[in-house]
Amino acid sequence: MSDGFVHCNNIKKLPGIILAAFLLFFIFMPLSVHANDVVVVIDPGHGGDNHGALYGDYIEKEMNLIVARAMQAELEKYEGIRVYLTREDSNRDISLRERAEFAAEKGADFLFCLHFNMSEDASLYGTEVWVSAFDEFYAQGHAFAQIHMEAQREKGLFDRGIKTRLNDGGIDYYGIIRHSRDLGMASALIEYCHLDHVYDQPYYALGDFQLEAFGRESATAVAQYFRLSSAILANDFSNFPVPYVPLPDAIVRPDISPPDVAQIELISLDEAERIAVFSLQAEDYDSHILYYGLSYDGGESFELLEPFPPGMREIEIEVALSAERDLDVAVLVLNAYDRKTLSNSIQLAALPEVVEVEAAPPLLAEDVFEDDFGEAAQDIAEEAADPAAPRPWSVDIHEQMLILQETDKWLLIAIGVLAIFVLMVMVSQIVRLPRQKRAAEYEYDDSHADEAAEDYDDDYDDDYDYDYDDEDEEVMY
């Protein structure tokens, strides 16, 4: 009886035991499931009154938030990761310390700070990543940055490098990186591109979908770094080859010196093509050369900076010669930290353009007929065109053409003289006509002269009387 009683009591307690087990399972299951999750905090740079870069209608704080939201949405499609944003809207402004503390409270394995860039003279372009200069924080940041930069290079952006920066106190310059290191978190500050440069504008200026693309690309780089997988995206990065970056032996200091070598030399000068070719030697012993820019006035102004090929020490540059002014050619080179060195200069004199006068086509045999030199000219042309025809003259065809041209000249002169003679005859005839007319009139007047004279005498006697006061003196009227 006692055994059966005990057995019955155990059976009665069983539902309570099962219920307690289920409660314990559901209470501790989230902890066990999330215990090994990767925790990522994304920080959209700036916010509130801190607008960040302003370029036209673009406001950096708003752009950063669009990228961050797209990055979070993409990362949440992967298993084994939790993602947080330091701010959810553009009106909230929090300090850099508060951002890092928020990430630490979430237990972040990595803090990613997102930004867009501008330069003082709008001359720089490209993408870059800033990381801590210290210990494992440098190694972790640099490993991620390599993955991220490769994706941006494939996209077409210019690679400005993975860099460190120190303040006057010798510690990390950027506050978000400095505070993250203080709190034991790896971090990276991403500068996607330069808003104020024509080379970078095609990557963001077409609409928000380009900003969202930045976010998805950064999310993929994070998933690859942490070797995550996504059934939704059909991505499995569990075996992704994350770059190995050894721990630095000392502080990884930035290059604060200008490039060590910047030298140009004239290789060739083609006046026909109006092109001068220069060799440019450029080198930086502490980092590498990023850009070069041509100057035609000895360094007063420069053309757009062009990428210097990675790993190269010498390149060739073509310069078009000017027809209006002398050129004072020099080249500016910039290293990874935008330190500058100006090369020597070489003068090129202006090369005026030569106007080519098109030569008259040679006189062909068939063209002779157009001038109508007569049968003799036609015979000469026909014989000249027929190599087998006998040639009565010892001169060649060119001399014959000269003879014909000379004949034509004298013919024109003769025609001109004849025309002048005819003109003179016509003029003389015109002049003589009035004289002949007057002569005919004179002959008519003479035939009646005597009769007119007689009538005149009769009339005169009738009309006039003469009185004499003295028979010896005549009074005349």
Image (spheres, grey):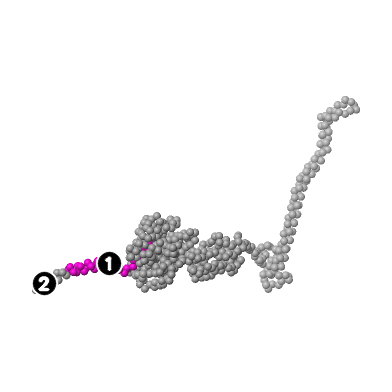
Residue at image mark 2: 5
Spot the residue most to the front. 169
Rate crowding at label 1 as few (under 14), some (14 to 19) or many (20 or more) other CA atoms within 10 Å: few
Would you identify the image quadrant in which residue 30 lies?
bottom left
Rate crowding at label 2 as few (under 14), some (14 to 19) or many (20 or more) other CA atoms within 10 Å: few
Task: Classify mark 2: helix, strand or loop.
Answer: helix
**Does 20 appear in magenta?**
yes
Do residues under tags 1 and 2 come within 8 Å of each other at their CB atoms? no
Task: Classify mark 1: helix, strand or loop.
Answer: helix
Q: Is residue 148 visible?
A: no
Q: Point out which mark residue 263 bears.
A: none
x, y percent for residue 236: 35, 71
Would you identify the image quadrant in which residue 477 lies?
top right
Between residues 22 and 275, which one lies in front from this camera angle?
22
Spot the residue most to the top. 469
Residue at (19%, 69%) from the top-left corner? 18
x, y percent for residue 154: 44, 68
**What span is in magenta?**
15-43
Q: Is residue 239 above or below residue 50?
A: below
Q: Is residue 345 visible?
A: yes
Real-space Cα distance between discs 1 and 2? 40 Å
x, y percent for residue 142: 41, 68
Amino acid bearing label 1: Pro
Q: Is residue 334 above or below residue 455?
A: below
Residue at image mark 1: 30
Q: Is residue 295 above or below residue 240?
A: above
Q: Is residue 468 above or below residue 385?
A: above
Amino acid bearing label 2: Phe
Residue at (43%, 61%) from the top-left corner? 116
- Helix, strand or loop for the magenta stretch, by majority: helix
x, y percent for residue 438: 78, 43
